[in-house]
Amino acid sequence: MKRTFVLFLIMMLLCTGIAAAEDTQLRGYIKGQGYKFVQFGTYPYDRKGNVEPVLWRVLELQDERMLLLSEYVIDMQQVIFESDKKIIEDHSYRRITDYVESDLYPWMNTVALDTLLGDSVMRNALIEEPGGGKFFIMTDEQFMNPAYGFPPAKMGEHPARTASPTPYAKSRGVYEHSNGKSPYWVNFVKNEVDYKLQIVGYDGHMSMGAYTRTNIGLRPSVRLDMSMLEVVSGAGTRKDPFILEYTGAADTVDVSGEEVE
């Protein structure tokens, strides 16, 4: 009886060890097991603008294409750049039919992307997201996708969609609720004659915010070609994220994303 119990304990330990070993692998979201985390690029983090590596959660890894979502709200920017208070109050700023027509779209894919990666060869691994670019905000459909760990409902409190702001984002004016969470933009224009873009609220519900709001944050995403990258260290946890290294053919890249021989 004692021998049988000892054998049972050994088998349990072996099974636990196998499961733990498997969970150290890079993967997308799995219900019941949660997310893996990755470091990629750098961005201003503290109130003084000092940069730190950006922490991302892995939403999906399929066919060597990996979708990442920033763990934090990292910055603030208007959808339509406008500072004239009368124009803002009258909602007389220009309308858009799609996110790509916004001022935020080119800013994300130039100024913000340059801030994230500079002239790093990592830019070669970025995959263009249709309707978003290489440094983008996700769509409402993506933020309601259970395969990514999100609820399919827009309304109500949904902690899975909430995110905390970095000190830098707060210094830029991002609103922080008493629960420590902040709203952020979503790629969805509900009505072309309206003046609002979708947002995820501080409690995870989805609503709309005027294009010129200056207290809505950015929680960006990137999609990476993993055939050009490999994991060199880390355990994939929030405290010990995977560190990626570029292994692609080109060893330089220009700021437009074009490979340089």
Image (spheres, rainbow, N blue to C red):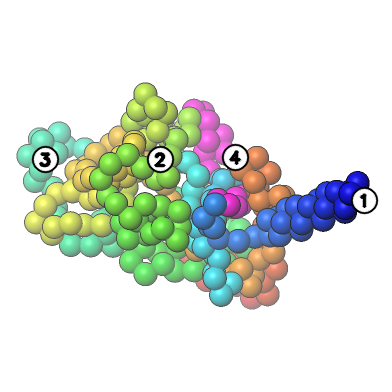
Amino acid tagged 4: Glu
Instruction: Say whether disc 3 or disc 4 marks the residue closer to the N-terminus.
Output: 4
Mark 1 secondary-structure assignment: helix
1 vs 3, front mark: 1
User: Marks 1/3: CA distance?
Assistant: 81 Å
Using the image as rendered, state which of residue 86 and residue 57 is in the foreground: 57
Amino acid tagged 3: Ile
Which numbered marker is on residue 52?
Answer: 4
Amino acid tagged 2: Pro
Asked if the residues shown at circle 1 and circle 3 are in contact, with their CB atoms under 8 angstroms apart, the answer is no
The quadrant where residue 100 appears: bottom left
User: Marks 3/4: CA distance?
Assistant: 37 Å
53 relative position to 137: left or right: right
- The residue to which callout 3 is attached is 87
Mark 4 secondary-structure assignment: strand
Which residues, given as a range, are shown in magenta? 33-52
From this view, report whether residue 116 is shown above or below residue 51: below
User: Marks 1/4: CA distance?
Assistant: 53 Å
> Is residue 92 shown to the viewer in this render?
yes
Q: Residues within 10 Å of mark 4 (few under 14, many from 20)?
A: some
